[in-house]
Image: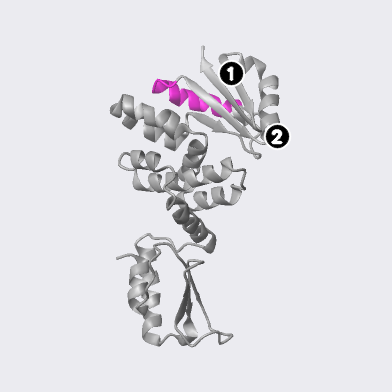
Amino acid sequence: MSFLDKLKAIFNLEVNCPLISINIAKNSNNLTNKEGLYDQAKGRLDLYLDNIDEVKKREIKELIKESIKEGNPILEINASELLSQLYEYNKENKNNQTLNFFKPIIPLEDFEALESSLYLREVFIKNGDVSKLKQDIRKRFGDRGNTIANLCTAGYFEKFLLPLYNSSKERFKELYEIIVAKSVLAIFIHSQMSQEQIPKDITNKLRISTKYGIKFIHIHGIGDYNINKIKECLGEQKEYFDFFQKEIYEKDNIIIVELLLK
């Protein structure tokens, strides 16, 4: 029984949505004489401690302790909002083909990170602000989730991992963990990364990649600042980049540099 199911049992609640924001607070302004109020439109449940008897308060406390002990995070409001947005987005059945393909072949937590990342990609394609979504994914899934978000946004799940699995399940099993854990397919340039760090990262990732027969790497940059940083690096480190066969794609404020081992 989930945390929400147990909470519903304590208060005999009728809540159909599987993802809601729960706010536990005092009823200091005498808003209601009820133990709680559920706003279906907002997907939010407010519980008022001043109106709850001591037995139920103890049950809530034990329920929260039990959930944390089992390793289930008590989400911040922002993370809960991400889940609610994702729930509404998934009701539109977008990306079902991709999700159904990967669900049985990757770890559950990776699948949940991919699910969130596909929503992030949809917002990005529509020119929405994804910085908060990206931060929420990192908070919930850690560095691994951040890598999955980067790979998903750049299309690697559909364009590389899916055909890889279809061509060889054994090869997929061999490479998947390396790709997700080490992000060996690509370097995603961000504002805190120095130009000197870019060739160092390429060298380190190529050393791992060549061991597994991957003979290319991509450099991704989004936005004027990161695009200029990549171009300056290509110019200043010309001797290093001449070691590769190089193709540059630039469109819609995005740059991708493909490096192939000669």
Kind of residue sitting beneath label 2: Asp
Identify which residue is drawn at 53% across, 53% down: 136
Q: Position of residue 93 (x, y in %)?
A: 41, 47
Q: Position of residue 221 (x, y in %)?
A: 62, 33
Identify which residue is drawn at 66% across, 17% down: 238
Q: How is the image coloured?
A: one colour
Q: Is 207 inside the magenta-drawn segment? A: yes
Identify which residue is drawn at 38% across, 39% down: 97
Q: In the visual, does 9 lie left or right of 38?
A: left
Q: Position of residue 18 (x, y in %)?
A: 39, 62
Label 2 packing within 10 angstroms: few (<14), some (14-19), many (20+): few
Q: Mark 2 points at which residue?
A: 224
Q: In this view, does 71 lie above or below 205?
A: below
Identify which residue is drawn at 36% across, 85% down: 55
Q: What stretch is highlighted in magenta?
A: 199-214
Q: Name the residue under label 1.
A: 247
Q: Is 134 inside the magenta-drawn segment? A: no
Magenta portion: prevailing SS class: helix
Q: Quadrant of residue 172?
A: top left
Q: In the visual, does 212 lie left or right of 200?
A: left
